Amino acid sequence: MKPSGLALSILLLGSAFGPAHAAPQTAPDAGVVELRAIGMRFEGPAEIPSGWTTFRFHNVSPMIHFAMIDVPPVDITLQQFSEALTVPFQVVMDAMNANDDAAIEAALGTFPAWLGDLGRAGGPGLLSPGLTGETAVYLSPGRYILECYVKNNGIFHTTPPGDGQMGMVLEFTVTDEDNGAAEPDANATVALSNTGIELVAGALRPGTNTIRVEFSEQQALPSFVGNDVHLLRVDDPASLTAASEWMDWRAPQGLQDPGPVVFLGGVQDMPAGSHAYFTVDLEPGDYALMAEVPDPLGMGLVLTFSVDAPVR
């Protein structure tokens, strides 16, 4: 599992970040779910049919967001998820910021016993303000919870802003009805292992790309995160280093908005053997696929690549 945050005022921003833009909006289609990040809340349907599901994620807020899909144990309510999990993570973060080792250990001891039973089902990756991204995952019938634990002012977005309130979490149910959507077609495939991200098929090109992400391996790190993949624009070598340092939520400035680079989406944690897709428009330039783990550069969980202008 991963952590959470507070509520701020909202502001609708347009995209003005330069040469790369997240996936364009398309006409409604089978299996497409419109999901919005507005300020520090999600807006989306409470019930959807099962099958291949494309989350069209609109970040209409002034801050970075993602939408990780958690699979809670069957008897754990959204209120319990919020109170028993997101609140202790904030206590841990506060103790880390205070360099209080005793308080960190005490807070870690308050995590619920069901934490190890919490599943992950992917979801849209890190997305900068004003952008729209598309991530497709296969969802079986059941109950799910979306969360975003990016931080503002040291507070996870999923941290409840007050007693009885919710942070940036959204519960939804997947029904037995099949949405009839076909599995997406990809022009490139990347594989995630515990030590690397590899382009194993196809190529990344100017224009629209649908990227298949294969979770060849998965790992549970001490920071409670695992393998995932996020696409970012690389302006220079320093920005790649800054992004790698930013990916560790335990650091005071880790996952703290604003981020050091432009994020264009991706796929959140999934079990080994799973796969998902995300779609993005790429203009010529330099990019990287990076995992949200501590020191992804040191772990090898970064893949840099360039997209060249087409020959005319």
Image (tube, rainbow, N blue to C red):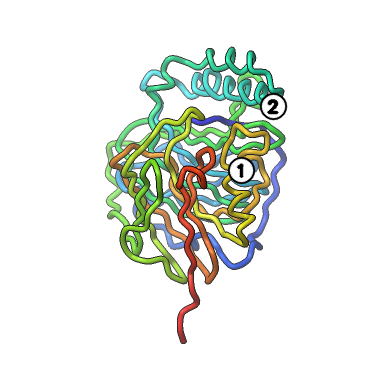
Q: Secondary structure at mark 1?
A: helix
Tell me what residue is drawn at x 69 percent, y 23 percent: 99
Considering only vertical position in the picture, is 204 above or below 9?
A: below
The quarter holding residue 164 reads top right
Q: Residue at x 51, y 31 (%)?
A: 2
Residue placed under numbered mark 2 in the picture: 97
Dot 2: element: helix
Image label count? 2
Q: Is residue 21 visible?
A: yes
Vertical relation: 271 (above or below) 203: above
| Residue 174 at x, y percent in the picture | 35, 37
Q: Name the amino acid, label 1.
A: Trp
* Viewer-side residue, 94 vs 194: 194
Between discs 1 and 2, the one toward the N terminus: 2
Image x and y of residue 199, in percent: 36, 58
Packing grade of label 2 (10 A; few <14, some 14-19, many >=20) is some
In the rendered structure, find residue 189 and report the number of the disc placed on it: none
- The residue singled out by tag 1 in the image is 246
Would residue 91 be found to the left or right of residue 224 on screen?
right
Q: Nearer the viewer, residue 250 or 40?
A: 250
Badges 1 and 2: C-beta atoms under 8 Å apart?
no
Q: CA distance from mark 1 to mark 2?
A: 15 Å
Amino acid type, residue under disc 2 in the picture: Asn
**In the depicted view, which residue is nearer to us: 150 or 42?**
150
The percent coordinates of residue 18 (x first, y second) are: 63, 66
Q: Residue furthest front?
A: 298
- Report x, y in % for residue 171: 47, 32
Bin the neighbour count of mark 1 within 10 Å (Cα to Cα): few under 14, some 14-19, many 20 and up. Answer: many
Q: Residue at x 40, y 26 (%)?
A: 118
Residue 34 visible, this angle:
no
